[in-house]
Image (cartoon, rainbow, N blue to C red):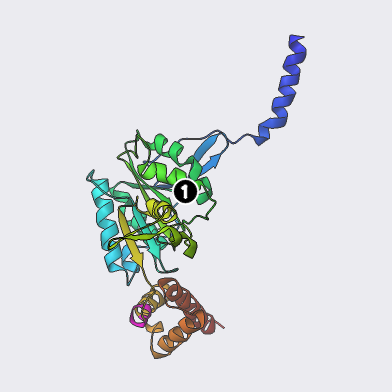
Amino acid sequence: MDAELSRRLTRLLDHVDHWLPPAPESVDWDTHVAAIWQRHPLGGRLLPIPPRDALGLDDLLGIERQKLALVDNTRAFLRGFPANHVLLWGARGSGKSSLIRALLNSLAADGLRMIQVDRHDLAGLPMLVEQLRHSSHRFVVYCDDLSFEGNDDAYKALKSVLDGALTGPPPNVLLYATSNRRHLLPESMEDNSGSRLVGEELHHGDAVEEKISLSDRFGLWLSFYPFDQDAYLEACCHWVAQLGRAEDWGAEARAEAIRFATLRGGRSGRSAWQFAAQWVGRKRLAENK
């Protein structure tokens, strides 16, 4: 009977083995500077990833104030001084995600380590933070393009880690997030129905307070706006020189850059890079026909 049971259990394990997640391997943070967090029903794991590119802080133009504030906050964190969780919010393509990448490239040598968590994996964020609590390294946990729908409960795990649990986040972990929404949650006219005036003071209703309470847990807000034409053209000139040669930029390129932004319906650092890639690519192609 015991032998038959053993055979049955062995067959069962053979059937389910390929459904089980691979055994997690520890990341060597002395070698790797970045990883992504993947959640699964039995826990989660960290997968080390190489840097995406060599983007530097000097490559990002038109956002000097935001760069200075983020670098100062991160340097203070790396040296063990008080620092804030950071929310980078604002116009699309204005450099929020690029600034995070450039920050890692610039400060990895100073001890910065970064872990990216997708919005759909936020439920496992408390588990991840606990894994990092006793590490000797300092981590920025990064959530890109973060926003939630009205019926999405994933933000509750983020609220808890930021400033809601009894333990709080460990001193070696900060959370940085980028979003097009200042309050991360959708806002509607109906939300304001509970607001009221008390004397000369405006008191928000519960719906508004709930939505503000999430972004309010980030101590540092950095706002990003569409570029004006001068900033856009400066970025175009920079990227044309980076992707090609300085002499690729001139009156003709300038006119084409303005036309490119008009057709795109806006100016941004992203559209400047896209124009430069198109312009330089066409120039090199014409030269090598």
Q: Is residue 239 above or below residue 185?
A: below
Q: Is residue 230 magenta?
A: yes
Q: Quadrant of the N terminus?
A: top right
* Stretch of the chain drawn in magenta: 229-233
Q: Residue at x 46, y 45 (%)?
A: 156
Q: Residue at x 39, y 42 (%)?
A: 161
Type of the residue with mark 1 = Tyr
Q: Is residue 5 left or right of residue 36?
A: right
- Spot occupied by residue 239 in the image (x, y as percentages of width and height): 40, 74
Numbered disc 1: secondary structure: helix
The single residue placed furthest to the front in the displayed view is 199
Q: Nearer the viewer, residue 2 or 170?
A: 170
- Spot occupied by residue 29 in the image (x, y as percentages of width and height): 38, 41
Q: Nearer the viewer, residue 201 or 79?
A: 201
Q: Residue at x 53, y 41 (%)?
A: 39
The residue that disc 1 covers is 155
Classified by dominant secondary structure, the portion drawn in magenta counts as helix
Q: Residue at x 49, y 40 (%)?
A: 124
- Spot occupied by residue 76 in the image (x, y as percentages of width and height): 23, 49
Q: Nearer the viewer, residue 192 or 132?
A: 192
Q: Is residue 110 left or right of residue 189?
A: left
- Spot occupied by residue 25 in the image (x, y as percentages of width and height): 49, 35
Report whether residue 27 is seen: no
Q: Is residue 72 magenta?
A: no
Q: Nearer the viewer, residue 65 or 185?
A: 185
